[in-house]
Image (cartoon, helix red, strand yellow):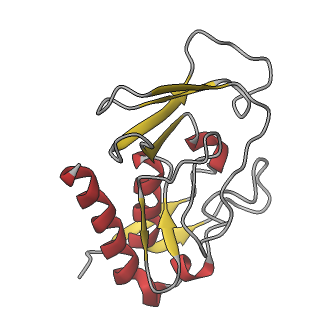
Amino acid sequence: MATLSARFRDPRSTKYDFITLIMVRCPGCEKAARVVLAPEDASPGGILFTPRRLVCHGCGLSRVWSGRLVTLSAGTAQPATDPYFGMPLWLQVETRHGWLWAYNLELLDLIRRFVQASLRERAPWYDTGQKMTLVARLPVWIKRAKNRDEILRAVSRIHASLVAA
């Protein structure tokens, strides 16, 4: 089904590189909404604890998060939620192995490129920098070549949900 890309090199991204924009299901109208950095607030707490804003262009809902509790989704056994407001992610679909989810299209594209590649390269062990990257922490069922077509179909279903919205 899928044409295989020759090579994927791990860009050494972590989940923190993808939380500046998170696509969620709006609690008001059930359409796609976004959790973005609050532009007027600057926080010395780093990217994880910077104040956020939940914005829905469908119904005009706007909420502000400036708390200190962040809950990052772990695992694929249940639907994922955003770390700030606890809203279900927009970019997720259930497979027979578990839930495939992404915070935004950039992360979804990274997963697609990784799964599609026939050659998956890690960073050299002797190189400095992040060793346990987001790609290294993907669940085993996503990494298995025998699940490649199923994962790519799931990514296509997620993209289709965006077009339908």
Is 128 placed above or below 119 here?
A: above
Question: Furthest residue to the top?
Answer: 40
Answer with the quarter of the image where residue 20 lies.
Answer: top right
Q: Left or right: where does residue 161 sit relative to residue 118? A: left
Identify the residue at horizontal 43%, vertical 66% (top origin): 7
Q: Left or right: where does residue 56 sit relative to residue 51? A: left
**Residue 112 image point, x, y percent:** 40, 63
Answer with the quarter of the image where residue 121 lies.
Answer: bottom right
**Residue 148 image point, x, y percent:** 40, 81
Give the quarter of the figure containing the N terminus.
Answer: bottom left
Question: Furthest residue to the bottom?
Answer: 146
Q: Left or right: where does residue 62 sit relative to residue 42? A: left
Identify the residue at horizontal 38%, vertical 71% (top origin): 116
In-front residue for pair 9/98: 98
Identify the residue at horizontal 48%, vertical 68% (top origin): 100
Is 42 placed above or below 75 here?
A: above
